[in-house]
């Protein structure tokens, strides 16, 4: 079989969608199907300048500038799952704020 890091994962797929439709915001994404070679995800994208989106208080948070390119930062549901952030409590001590940050914290040699 292939190695773990070979092939496109969830994050690269979401990044590709976000770059293809730059004017839209990625609201969320979820797994649909897979076979031996491919995985299929559905991506829900929103136009932040649409009047209905801007006027709806339940969804207009996505119109803020800070919500640009959530998919590039791994903030959608599939991105959070890929980063291992579905785990909560004491099992998550090696995951937060990120697995790389926790690794650096535990393995950095401090001379003073």
Image: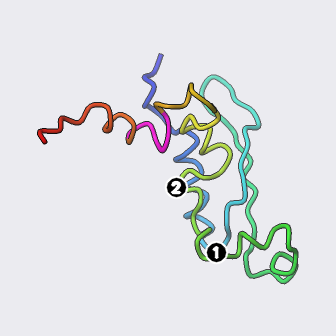
Query: Magenta region's main secondary structure?
Result: loop
Which corner quadrant of the image does residue 63 belong to? bottom right
Look at discs 2 and 1 and give the one toward the viewer: 2
Task: Identify the element where label 1 is drawn.
Answer: loop
The residue lying at 50 percent from left, 40 percent from top is 96
Disc with the residue nearer the chain's start (2 vs 1): 1
Residue 33: x %, y % from top left: 75, 32
Which residue lies under the disc numbered 1? 23
Whether residue 20 appears in magenta in the rendering, the answer is no
Q: Which mark is residue 12?
A: none
Give the residue displayed 74% in from the left and 73% down from the top. Answer: 47
Res. 71 image quadrant: bottom right
Is 96 colored magenta in this rendering? yes
- Placement of the C terminus among the 4 image quadrants: top left
In the image shown, does 76 or 23 lie closer to the viewer?
76
Residue drawn at (66%, 76%), measured in percent from left and top?
A: 64
Q: Which residues are magenta?
A: 95-100
């Amino acid at each position: 079989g292939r190695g773990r890091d070979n092939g496109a994962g969830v994050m690269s797929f979401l990044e590709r969608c976000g770059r293809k439709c730059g004017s839209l915001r990625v609201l969320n994404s979820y797994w649909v199907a897979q076979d031996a070679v491919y995985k299929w995800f559905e991506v829900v994208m929103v136009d932040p300048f649409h009047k209905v989106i801007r006027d709806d208080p339940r969804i207009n948070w996505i119109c803020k500038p800070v919500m640009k390119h959530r998919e590039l930062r791994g903030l959608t549901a599939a991105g959070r799952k890929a980063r291992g952030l579905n785990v909560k409590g004491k099992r998550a001590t090696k995951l937060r704020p990120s697995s790389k940050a926790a690794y650096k914290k535990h393995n950095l040699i401090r001379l003073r």
